[in-house]
Image (cartoon, rainbow, N blue to C red):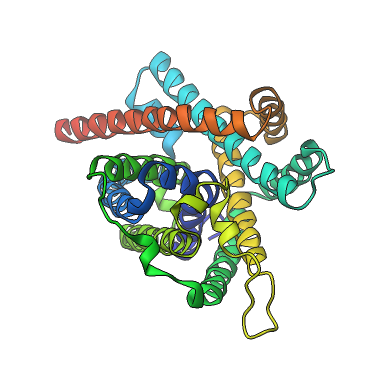
Amino acid sequence: MKNKISLFEFSSMLFSVTLAPFLGIGIYNILKISKNDSFISILIGYILSIILIFIYKKISDYMPELNIKEKIIRLFNKRNAFIVIVILSICFFLISCILSYNINSFIISQFLSETPILFVTVILFILVIYINKKGFNTIARVSLILAILSIILIFIASIGKYQQFNITNLKPILNFGIKNPIIGGIMCFLMTTIHSFLLLIVPKNNILNNNKIYKYIFITITFAYLIFMIITIYTISVLGIDLALLYHYPAYITMKEISIVTFIDKIENFIIIHWIFEIFISLSINIYFIFKMTNIKPIIIISLNIILDILLFKNSTSFNFLVTKYLPIISIIIIFIMVILFLKIKKRVKTL
């Protein structure tokens, strides 16, 4: 039982790694591409995510006592296994850089304008190092607690906005055809669900009651995309698409200056607390994944993360440009590797 995690803990981690990129860079890019039809993009992204579950299932079921690194070593020769492990590690390392800069930049821009971003980054990563030092079971338990709190915060924030909901801001629908919603749906999928492969670092046999794992994955992905839908529709209906696109963090702006029954003010702070929770868990899992894949200590991974953030992201403009252009490519590389694993496993199983 010591190294086992529950299905609820597994689901909470999946919830966090899926939701974390959406609340910042995700929703802005989807709105930019699909505009009023963004909710259609969410539906398309959800359909693609359900398809992805079948690839995840095939990889997870193969030699369930092994994690993703050990499976790669079994499926490839030594040289190719090394290359695949390195590429996956680099891809998720770059994703961790994007997530950390995004949340730190947001905190600086909204709350601590006179504070160096490096200071906020270091504080966040000290917590990530600490929880990684405690082990993956601790990450799973903390994830479950924070996921429950996040759901409560989303519920509270949604209640605070219902009176300002304006359905006319969602019209016209498909005014420019279906092409942009499809592109937006693919972008949504690439920026969110693809992170679920991080959890392959956990051997299936280390999950209690794992015969129900795919049912829980389906429910978790469905619930995450329902939240995507709620946040997207609220943002467009409250702000209108033109105003929403003026902000890099439209979901946060949507909640500004709203109160619930006169005693809960500043509803937008519920969103930022929720987002920090998701980013913290997602970064912790990313760092753990890279550590298990490469045996590089978390403190070294995090130091490299900070250095790369400083070198790559000079400001929010360069950040948005690089993320929009290169994050989909990183995600496609991850999918490509997972499809190769899927096909190799399928071939290996047939020959047995």
Q: Residue at coordinates 68% horizontally, 69% vertically from top-left?
A: 266
* In-image side of 25 versus 295 (left or right): left
Q: Identify the residue at the far right of this view.
A: 114
Q: As rendered, which of 121 and 178 lies closer to the eye?
A: 178
Q: Identify the residue at the far bottom of this view.
A: 261
Q: As rendered, which of 166 and 66 lies closer to the eye?
A: 166
Q: Is residue 314 above or below residue 22?
A: above
Q: Residue at coordinates 84% horizontally, 43% vertically from top-left?
A: 114
- The number of discs equals 0
Residue 194, position as x, y percentages in the image: 40, 42
Can see residue 122? yes
Question: Residue 328's quadrant in the figure?
Answer: top left
Q: Residue at coordinates 17% horizontally, 34% vertically from top-left?
A: 352
Q: Is residue 95 above or below residue 326?
A: below
Can see residue 291? no
Question: Residue 222's quadrant in the figure?
Answer: bottom left
Q: As rendered, which of 175 and 151 lies closer to the eye?
A: 175
Q: Is residue 115 above or below residue 336?
A: below
* In-image side of 227 versus 178 (left or right): right
Q: Residue at coordinates 45% horizontally, 71% vertically from top-left?
A: 165
Q: As rendered, which of 218 and 105 lies closer to the eye?
A: 105
Q: Identify the residue at the far left of this view.
A: 350
Residue 19, position as x, y percentages in the image: 49, 53
Residue 283, position as x, y percentages in the image: 60, 44
* In-image side of 267 versus 168 (left or right): right
Residue 2, position as x, y percentages in the image: 57, 58
